[in-house]
Image (cartoon, grey):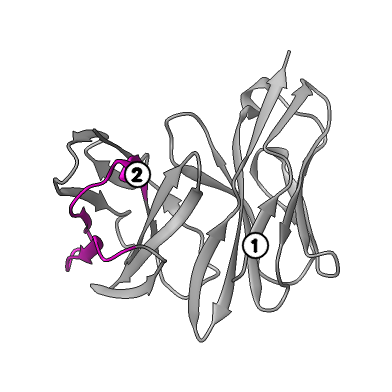
Amino acid sequence: KAGVTQTPRYLIKTRGQQVTLSCSPISGHRSVSWYQQTPGQGLQFLFEYFSETQRNKGNFPGRFSGRQFSNSRSEMNVSTLELGDSALYLCASSPRTGGQTEAFFGQGTRLTVV
Amino acid sequence: AQSVTQLDSQVPVFEEAPVELRCNYSSSVSVYLFWYVQYPNQGLQLLLKYLSGSTLVKGINGFEAEFNKSQTSFHLRKPSVHISDTAEYFCAAEWGTGGSYIPTFGRGTSLIVHP
């Protein structure tokens, strides 16, 4: 079974631009969560999508948004990029939502904002 | 707000020695606990999880953790480490609030195994 696939692996953007990251979950998994990982703040939960609906949301500004398609693939968008958005963005998939569920992580997309 | 605290940012240890990575969380009410490992340039991989039942949880790669409700701790242990255990380790917790489970991660502990 293929794991969680995130594309692209690396990205360099300029302040003010927007960016879209993609995540393909493990086949059959309907829950996709996104995390931001930085040296200063650690791993922070962005949001979770399940069956194309946002189920949970972390404490991030509205510049961070996401969506999920009918095939469970998910995209995350960050608009008006700031230097502080430089981070490793991790996507994780689970077979279901509602806690108690192991999350399977992708390798991440490393975003650098210059 | 709920929180997870990993008490050590870095733990150096010699190969074949025992190790304990410490984790404390803010509340034992309706909590699920996890330990993940992250190797360089990789995503996170689940080592073990506590949902309910036995307080001693065994995971992959010889790791185990004990859920201590009174001390709100979930420390990770391994009796004998290998060089290949060098990685970043994350403790995580989920609290069910109104049916919503938002995971909270600790800052991570870097385990460095020396030969």
Q: Secondary structure at mark 1?
A: strand
**Dot 1 corresponds to which residue?**
B33
Q: Is residue A48 magenta?
A: no
Q: Is residue A84 magenta?
A: yes
At which x and y percent is residue B31?
Answer: 65, 72
Report the amino acid beneath label 2.
Gly
User: Which residue is at a point 83% across and 35% down the rendered structure image?
Assistant: B79
- Report crowding for label 1: few under 14, some 14 to 19, many 20 or more residues within 10 A (C-alpha): many
- Residue furthest to the bottom in view is B98
- Residue furthest to the left in view is A17
Report in which chain the residue with disc 1 lies. B
At which x and y percent is residue B42?
Answer: 43, 35
At which x and y percent is residue B72?
Answer: 78, 65
Q: Is residue A2 visible?
A: no
Q: What stretch of residues is rendered in magenta?
A: A61-90
Q: Quick check: A14 above or below A32?
A: above
User: Which residue is at a point 24% across and 63% down the rendered structure image?
Assistant: A65
User: Which residue is at a point 31% across and 69% down the rendered structure image?
Assistant: A49
Q: Is residue B21 visible?
A: yes
**Dot 2 corresponds to which residue?**
A84
Distance CA(mark 1)–CA(mark 2): 29 Å
Look at the image and tell me in which quarter the C terminus of chain A lies: top left
